[in-house]
Image (cartoon, rainbow, N blue to C red):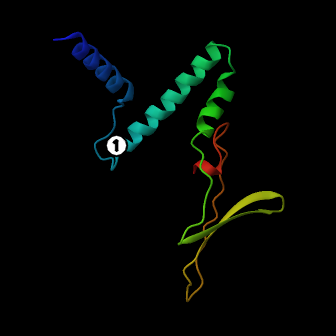
Amino acid sequence: MGKKTLLLLTVGVLLAYYAYIPLPDNLEEPWRLMWTATYIKTVKNLAIFAELLGITNLMDAAKFLISLQEVPPISDENVTVTETTFSNIPVRVYVPKRKSEKPRRGLFYIHGGGWCFGSADLM
């Protein structure tokens, strides 16, 4: 076996070990949970590394890395998205563009804040 093959095999095994988590058999999309757990683990490790280098503290580094995935909500052909405030509380309203014959049901979702991370944009 050549050096390149051995290196590729070693890197593949280490990546599989890093990404693998044992999961129950009855999950619908186990790869999605594994991907999310690997993402969180990577953010944690990068934040620890940034703190060890003295760049910033762990929480600020993690908040920065998580904020990179935030995508602002946009309206499309099916829904209109508006951001407003109700009694000085920021609110995002999603209204379907399709007309309805009868009254529609609504969903009132309160984002818990993610303790110290995240925002409603990540939900």
- Residue lying at the far bottom of the rendered structure: 101
Instruction: Determine which residue is flagged by label 1.
Output: 30
Determine the image quadrant of residue 36.
Answer: top left
Residue 104 x %, y %:
58, 79
Q: The disc labelled 1 sits on which kind of residue?
A: Pro
Taking the spot 38% from the left edge, 29% from the top edge, the residue there is 19
Q: Nearer the viewer, residue 30 or 61?
A: 61
- Residue 119 as seen in the image, left or right of residue 10: right
In the image, residue 2 above or below residue 33: above
- State how many labels appear: 1
CA neighbours of label 1 inside 10 A, class few (<14), some (14 to 19), many (20+): some
Q: Quadrant of the N terminus?
A: top left
- Residue 112 as seen in the image, left or right of residue 15: right
In the image, residue 12 above or below residue 114: above
Residue 119 x %, y %:
65, 46
Residue 47 x %, y %:
59, 24
In the image, residue 57 above or below residue 119: above
Taking the spot 63% from the left edge, 53% from the top edge, the residue there is 72
Determine the image quadrant of residue 110.
Answer: bottom right
Taking the spot 48% from the left edge, 34% from the top edge, the residue there is 39
Residue 33 x %, y %:
41, 41
Q: Nearer the viewer, residue 109 or 53?
A: 53
- Residue 110 as seen in the image, left or right of residue 40: right
Taking the spot 24% from the left edge, 10% from the top edge, the residue there is 3
